[in-house]
Amino acid sequence: MTHLAANGGSPIRLQQWPAWPAPAPSALNALNEVLHSGRWAISGPYQGKQSFERRFAEAFAAYHEIAHCVPTASGTASLMVALEACGVGAGDEVIIPGLTWVANASTVAGVNAVPVPVDVDPLTLCLDPAAVERAITPRTAAIVVVHLYSAVADLDALTAIAKRHDVALIEDCAQAHGARFRGRRVGTFGAFGTFSMQHSKVLTSGEGGAVITGDGALSRRAEHLRADGRTYTAHEPAVGEMELDQTAELMGSNRCLSEFQAAVLLGQLELLDEQNERRRANAALLDDGLGALGIRPQVSSPGTTERTYYEWAGRIEDDEIGQLGVGPIASAVAAELSGAGIYTSYPPMNHNRLYRPASRSRFKAVAGLDLTGYSLPVAEDAGRRVVTVHHSALLGDESDAKDIVRAFEKVFTHHRELRG
Ligand SMILES: *Cc1c(COP(=O)(O)O)cnc(C)c1O
């Protein structure tokens, strides 16, 4: 007799989940305005109006109460711009978390530096400051900290370490738009905060990104790096002229956000706080309900004053269930819930199948890019035991959160059906 939907039983829920992404009410008008504006990119001629890209940069900087924002084409682009603006390059080492999306390793290799994965804290799943301290060498040029899933990393300890060793701290906030630490938005604690606005993130335009900084000189470097060595002119151009000035202060690459993406982001940003709040309320229900089933919720570092949820994450503590591996559990729970985003954690960076520098000619001559020799026991454990719930499943109401708990409960009760 089969109970689990994964094995052909009936699912506990057929109802759809809140749609993601969902456009802001202003999106259609804004997109229409761009379509007929004569300017689809900041590298197109000036049309007598502030670009959407500039408008978004000002709104995003104001949201963070920081002086500068430079939008970019993606989160990946934002990381490369931040690293290069900080002077990171050939011969440098960059400390990254052992548990994160592949982009944190590939972007370091992408600026000709070497990623050094460091283990994470078992409770927060973010960089372990003591392990960071041990990994610092005379070649360390930067630390990239990721505020992973729903946690803020230990910024007290990490800012102190970066300062003591005189290395740049870059905060990757691709999963933490809107979170606060000691009352301040994350992304404002290091040299740069970097963001992704890719489809899955809590603020999105399909693809997109941004860096923020309080430092005017770093911001100017970032502007050049993302627009082929050009920056906005100091004076308003005539209609039909370029608004980007070829200062050539620094060679860049084209990593610009388009006007369509910026127009969408302006509307989405207005929804962010309310959506983050709704996710927080539903996440609290998962903390209680899934906690009672023996899934230990991820916690955020002391000093966190506002948490945001890109994913709800928790570790399966029961050894018998845990030994099944989190993959079959996540699939079985997803099968009960008609398409809710139930996933495994990232694999540890020493065994990440997407990280394959040897597969590209440009990396063949670089030493130190093979990360398989690192030992990352906490990240490795997370890869086997941590299950995540995507934020789109947290945008509903209390009954949706209860369905998620019921699905886990059912799969745990009948977990033996998953042993082939
Ligand atoms: C999504 C993500 C990125 C990459 O962003 P893209 O916009 O997909 O390039 C980088 N770091 C983290 C932590 C992410 O979650």
Image (cartoon, rainbow, N blue to C red):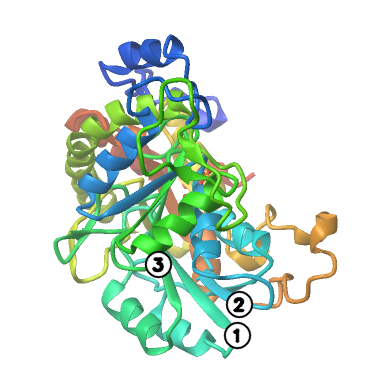
Q: Residues within 10 Å of mark 2 (few under 14, many from 20)?
A: many
**Taking 320 as reference, is 280 above or below it?**
above
Q: Is residue 108 left or right of residue 180?
A: right
In the rendered structure, the answer to whether residue 210 lies left or right of residue 186 reads: right
Q: Is residue 221 above or below residue 410?
A: below
Above or below, 241 relative to 229: above
Disc 3 + disc 1, Cβ < 8 Å: no
Q: Position of residue 419 (x, y in %)?
A: 59, 47
Name the residue nearer the viewer: 99 or 32: 32
Quick one: label 1, few (<14), some, or many (20+) residues within 10 Å?
Answer: few
The residue that mark 1 highlights is 139
State the separation of the CA atoms marked 3 and 1. 23 Å
Q: Residue at x 48, y 63 (%)?
A: 382
Is residue 418 shown left or right of residue 306?
right
Residue 46 in view of the camera: yes
| Element on which disc 1 rests | loop
Tell whether label 2 touches label 3 (CB within 8 Å). no
Q: Is residue 189 above or below residue 77?
A: below
Residue at horizontal 21 percent and vertical 40 percent from the top: 282
Residue denoted by label 2? 93
Decide which of 221, 199 is in the foreground and name it: 221
Q: Which numbered disc, 3 or 2, marks the residue that appears first in the sequence?
A: 2
Q: So how many labels did they put on this image?
A: 3
- Residue 394: x and y in percent read 28, 36
Q: Quadrant of residue 161?
A: bottom left
Mark 1 belongs to which amino acid? Answer: Arg
Residue placed under numbered mark 3 in the picture: 126
The disc labelled 2 sits on which kind of residue? Answer: Glu
Quadrant for the C terminus, please: top right
Label 2 close to label 1 by CB (< 8 Å): yes
Marks 3 and 2, how far apart in space? 19 Å
Residue 38's label in the rendered image is none
